[in-house]
Image (cartoon, rainbow, N blue to C red):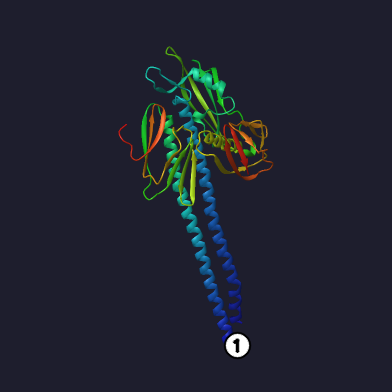
């Protein structure tokens, strides 16, 4: 009788340990996956904000000019620029951002670009893939 | 007596420890989500301020808007406004923003004041949206101004200020979504658009105008199969463009 009670107590403690371990792993995974998603969203949001800002600043600029944008190393996303809407997409995720300036000859589609060049010539803004050359 | 006491304490302490751990975890997760909420609000405010600055700069520096373009050099001059463009915009855009500086997330109205030597307003022009979100449907509102020069001719240039009121709210988001879908359809960029929109009250639609309460905005396209929204909530809006200016709405 005494032995069986000790055994059941040990089993209970073992079960509690297993359950608490499972709970801990679940919580840690939840927090980590949440943080991972958040970081990815933050990166995409920041890139979208930077590109939208470049377009708006080009639109607000007096005269001709050009400005390049280099994507952060390791970030592979597709870029689509519609009339006043920018869409960045990675597998299973899409981030969009509006802007106020007018980009000519939209839509633009770029697959995993490393660098984009925004040019303003005679009042029209155009976008090209690659490094900006001599104006 | 000692052995049973130990057991009793252990039986009481274990559930309490479990509850304490759960409370700690809930607190940890809640603080993570609260911080995220604060971060989002800060980002929205930052977006609004940069949008206001950019709209003001585009209006005053872009030849598509009201900036003066020299016929000799074919270039615009920073912060110099053309009085003819001001007259044109003030009569043409009484109920909506000009496309040259439109942002589909916000609504805005701009007032240009011409000042005399005593800094009194001697003439003014107003254009942009006339109806804005109010009360519960209003999310945020900012007002900025920049000094400008108003050019009548080469001998007659006056000083003034351009004041922008930028508003973010349910009415602006709704109208922005429909107008963006309309413009994208007209430019053959996209025939369908989808967005989740949260509204804080009823929305009505009649004769190309969308309203919340007494505040209305004119839309660029006619809406088909849309008779408004009766109660607050989050709605998945879907639209399909039909040439030349019809949006078929589904929700």
Q: Give the x, y percent position of residue B214.
A: 67, 32
In the foreground, A107 or B162: A107
**Which residue extends farthest bottom?**
A1
Give the class, few, some or many, for how many residues have Cα within 10 Å of label 1's Cα (few <14, many ≥20).
few
Please, which chain is the residue tagged with disc 1 on? A
Residue position marked by numbered label 1 in the rendering:
A1
Q: Give the x, y percent position of residue B105.
A: 54, 37
Q: Which residue is drawn at 59% across and 68% down?
A: B16
In the picture, measured across the screen, residue A45 lies left or right of residue B208, that is: left
Q: Give the x, y percent position of residue A10.
A: 54, 79
Q: Give the x, y percent position of residue B149.
A: 45, 20
In the picture, measured across the screen, residue A53 lies left or right of residue B138, that is: left
Q: In which quarter of the image is the N terminus of chain B?
A: bottom right
- Examine the rendered structure and indicate whether residue A47 appears above or below residue B107: below
In the picture, measured across the screen, residue B190 lies left or right of residue B5, that is: left
**Element assignment for label 1:** loop
**Which residue extends farthest top?**
B155
In the foreground, B15 or B202: B202
- Examine the rendered structure and indicate whether residue B191 appears above or below residue A6: above
Q: Quadrant of the C terminus of chain B?
A: top right
Q: Tell me if residue A13 can be seen.
A: yes
**Which residue extends farthest left?**
A134
Q: How many labels does the image show?
A: 1
Quadrant of res B140: top right
**Which residue extends farthest front?**
B243
Q: Tell me if residue B138 can be seen.
A: no
């Amino acid at each position: 009788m005494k032995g069986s009670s000790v055994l059941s107590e040990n089993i209970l403690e073992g079960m509690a340990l297993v359950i608490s371990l499972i709970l801990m792993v679940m919580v840690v995974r939840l927090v980590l996956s949440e943080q991972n998603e958040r970081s990815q969203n933050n990166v995409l949001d920041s890139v979208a904000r930077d590109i939208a800002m470049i377009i708006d600043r080009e639109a607000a600029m007096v005269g001709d000019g050009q400005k390049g944008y280099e994507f952060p190393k390791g970030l592979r996303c597709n870029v689509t620029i519609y009339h006043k809407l920018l869409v960045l997409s990675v597998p299973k995720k899409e981030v969009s951002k509006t802007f106020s300036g007018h980009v000519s000859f939209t839509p633009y589609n770029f697959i995993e670009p490393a660098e984009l060049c925004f040019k303003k010539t005679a009042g029209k803004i155009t976008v090209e893939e690659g490094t900006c050359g001599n104006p | 007596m000692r052995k049973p006491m130990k057991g009793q304490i252990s039986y009481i302490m274990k559930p309490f420890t479990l509850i304490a751990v759960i409370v700690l975890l809930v607190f940890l997760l809640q603080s993570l989500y609260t911080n995220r909420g604060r971060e989002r609000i800060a980002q929205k405010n930052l977006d609004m301020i940069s949008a206001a600055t950019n709209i003001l700069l585009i209006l005053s520096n872009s030849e598509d808007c009201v900036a003066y373009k020299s016929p000799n050099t074919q270039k615009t001059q920073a912060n110099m406004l053309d009085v003819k463009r001001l007259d044109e915009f003030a009569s043409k855009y009484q109920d909506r923003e000009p496309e040259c500086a439109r942002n589909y997330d916000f609504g805005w109205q701009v007032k240009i004041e011409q000042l005399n030597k005593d800094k009194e307003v001697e003439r003014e022009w107003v254009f942009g949206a006339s109806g804005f979100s109010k009360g519960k449907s209003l999310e945020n509102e900012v007002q900025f101004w920049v000094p400008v020069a108003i050019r009548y001719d080469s001998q007659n240039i006056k000083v003034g200020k351009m004041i922008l009121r930028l508003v973010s709210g349910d009415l602006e988001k709704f109208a922005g979504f429909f107008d963006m879908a309309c413009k994208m359809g007209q430019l053959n960029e996209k025939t369908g658009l989808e967005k989740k929109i949260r509204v804080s009250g009823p929305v009505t639609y009649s004769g190309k105008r969308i309203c919340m309460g007494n505040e209305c905005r004119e839309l660029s396209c006619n809406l088909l199969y849309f008779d408004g929204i009766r109660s607050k909530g989050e709605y998945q809006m879907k639209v399909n463009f039909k040439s030349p200016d019809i949006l078929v709405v589904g929700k």
